[in-house]
Image (cartoon, coloured by chain):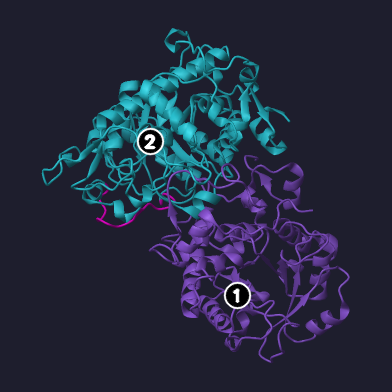
Chain colours: A cyan, B purple
Amino acid sequence: MMELFAERMDGKQAIIVDRYLNIPRQSSPEFWTASRIEHIRKLAATGRPAFVWDPCKSGSKRVLDRLFFRRELEDLVPSADGLEEPDGIDVGCEVAYGRIRMSVPLYLGDMSFGALSGIPNVALARAADSTGVLCGIGEGGVHPEVAKCKRIVIQWASARFGLDLHRLRLGEAVVIKIGQGAKPGIGGHLPGAKVVEIISRTRRIPVGTDAISPAPHHDIYSIEDLEQRIWALKEATGKPVFVKVAATNYVAYVAAGVARMGADGIIIDGQGAGTGAAPSVVRDNVGIPIELAVATADAMLRREGMREGFTVIAAGRVSSAEDTAKLMALGADCVSIGTAALIAMGCVMVHKCHLGFCPAVITNKIEENPKKVLSLEFAQRCVENLIRGWKGELKLILERLGLRRATELVGRRDLLVGIGLKGPTKRVLGVEVLQ
Amino acid sequence: MRFYSKSVRMEGRTLSYLRQMAGTEGKVPGEPPIVSMGSTAPPFVEEPQSLLDHIVSDGAQVTRPSIDPYREPVETFVYLFEGDVRLSMPVGISYLSDLSRELVEEVVRACYRMGVMVDLFGLEDEPSSVAGREDYVLSHTDDLKATAARNVQFVVAERAELDPEPVRRVLSSGKRPVARVPATDEVELYAALASAGFKAIVIDEDLKSDREVDLEIAVSLCDRTLRSPSFGTKALRYTVNLIATSRRLRGSGDVFKLLGLGAEAVLLKDCWRAAVDLQAEKDPEVVAERLEYLLLGIQKELKLLAGAAGASSLHSTICGNRELFRAVEINDQLLDTLGVKAAGSW
């Protein structure tokens, strides 16, 4: 399985990609604007914070971008000049969820081996190890190099690709994947064009065939079924078990059910989250934004007395430390980043992952004689720097908010204020709204 | 009062999506187009163009299971006229009025082959291909020469004070009586038509009225009116079909949401014409082939949406099931008007 890192089979050298492409002009509206990509690149290059309050939210239609920390509105000094040294600030970003300790509440979102072309999977897992965060491996089985990393989370999805008891125990935790934000209600999808020999062996499926996972787990048809699987996985692995769901219309009930059935936490993936391949009709018409889902799930869990000791991880369009802080204030314990980590490795958001010819060689089809390969060192360093820079910005935000620890921020909706939000949105978020 | 204009924009992402499905572009006709990375759909990235852009469908997550639309059956049939007509999917093709005779004949045949409705509203002559396919054809009394074969009689009504003569003529014709009305909030009109004995109401947003509302609102109001005992219409909803149409509809996402709001079938206008590229493609057989591919793709997409929402039948589980849907970025009053809950509410 080592051919991923080997020279080309024909003995010639592939081009090692260790720099960014120019950001193409975006001809249609995009959430990941050039300014968001540039910000992530800045963090990835320097490992240092670029600003306190995120200027990229200006003009965005997303609800989260129309929420502000009151402190920001009081901040008359533009944040760009004279950023404090984050190392010198006595603010703790560390969090712990049961036995799992993290240096910063960041989870590198579940991207599979197959959707990504191997080197990015290894870069993410190694970066999680070196920076003390977590990396979800997605549902494509465990890449042999990823298996050597410690801070990984093994995903148990509906197709059970490449899993056995040994592999289930490799990580810090197990995630039962019920759904994902980009295609709620339907299963994972790896186009046949990307199912090459090594993917075929890892997933144990024929070369060239679409890998379309079942929409439901065929042994989980109810919340009681889920309970049995949660406890079976806990007994089999001795690890905490999380459940990943898409943010959909009944997410509050789903969150309550997941908590009641004994899971250690829930990963809620919102509308607009990334994907390697999905039918456009599902991606564009199903699911609700993460900010609404987190707020409503948190409120339900509190009402039911199940919020203590239960971890809520928010995913979907998390683009900056400020997004992290706001989602925590709305009720998340931690956030998951996927697209942002890909951008740190060079993704330029051309939306071509499903075709297998990613210009940034992140989601490309794995070839025997590739013309270009992503530099593992470069990719790993960029993700590590992104996490450090992100942590720096989060520290600066916490310091401005007068908080000493990141955990103090969870559920502090009173620190937020919305601008121009409609009545129903305001009630779900539980924040004050200025018109 | 309208919230969004009726402007029609089949361009950019929407146009490319439609053309891929029809096989006018790309290499996988008849399949739901696959995309990657985060959505740019309205209302949070792109500008919303209609109330439909504020409505989201559900994806079942564990508390009830989704249905695997690739491997398990999801029924897309809908029954009209109290079970007399079974469509293969809740879709029809409309806006044929300016097409060549040859093209109309092929489109009628293509629709019949695919088991969907074809709406001849605005056509002056009845195409010969209608013969033997009448169950699938909606045609208009005043526009078409009377033929003995026609099964449906139409009347266009705008006011609750129905014009008695055409209504009597249609109702006594022995054919299935259908009324075509503008999208209006005049719920008395819907109640009057149902009480008079019409078997289907076509809400056509492109008809003019001085009490026009968005099609989404009209469909929801009509559905709820015919279910409401306060109009004395009792359970007439179960004997009257509700069909919605507008030039601005863009495909299966819009169809699915209109079903949720209360329609049993949705007639497509500009989107199929853009998908098959009527402007450039003049060969009727190529147009018919593309139309069939498009309908096949739409059917698969409807199955994806229904399966994702955990529904195994469009007709019995989606039609009028407003509870399954949620709205984003809409104020309280409009939520009430649509009869849909806000996203995130319990």
Q: Quadrant of the C terminus of chain B?
A: top right
Give the residues drawn in magenta, as a range.
A203-218
Q: Hey, which residue is sitting farthest bottom in the picture?
A: B148
Q: Please tell me whether mark 2 or mark 1 is closer to you in this view.
A: 2
The magenta stretch spans residue A209: yes
Q: Hey, which residue is sitting farthest left in the picture?
A: A11
Residue assigned mark 2: A342
* The image quarter in which residue A7 lies: top left
Q: Amino acid at mark 2?
A: Leu
Q: Is residue B144 above or below residue A75?
A: below
Read off the chain for label 2: A
The magenta stretch spans residue A357: no
Residue assigned mark 1: B117
Nearer to the camera, A356 or B324: A356
Please name the residue shown 25% across and 48% down the image: A199
Residue A96 in view:
no
Q: Position of residue A51 (x, y in %)?
A: 50, 20
Please name the residue shown 34% across and 21% down the image: A131
Spatial separation of the CA atoms under disc 2 and disc 1: 46 Å
Q: Secondary structure at mark 1?
A: strand
Question: In terms of secondary structure, what is the magenta stretch mainly?
Answer: loop
Q: Position of residue A269 (x, y in %)?
A: 49, 39
- Neighbor class of circle 2 (other Cα within 10 Å; few <14, some 14-19, many 20+) is many
Read off the chain for label 1: B
Q: Position of residue A150 (x, y in %)?
A: 29, 27
Q: Position of residue B225 (x, y in %)?
A: 78, 61
Q: Is residue A226 above or below residue A312?
A: below
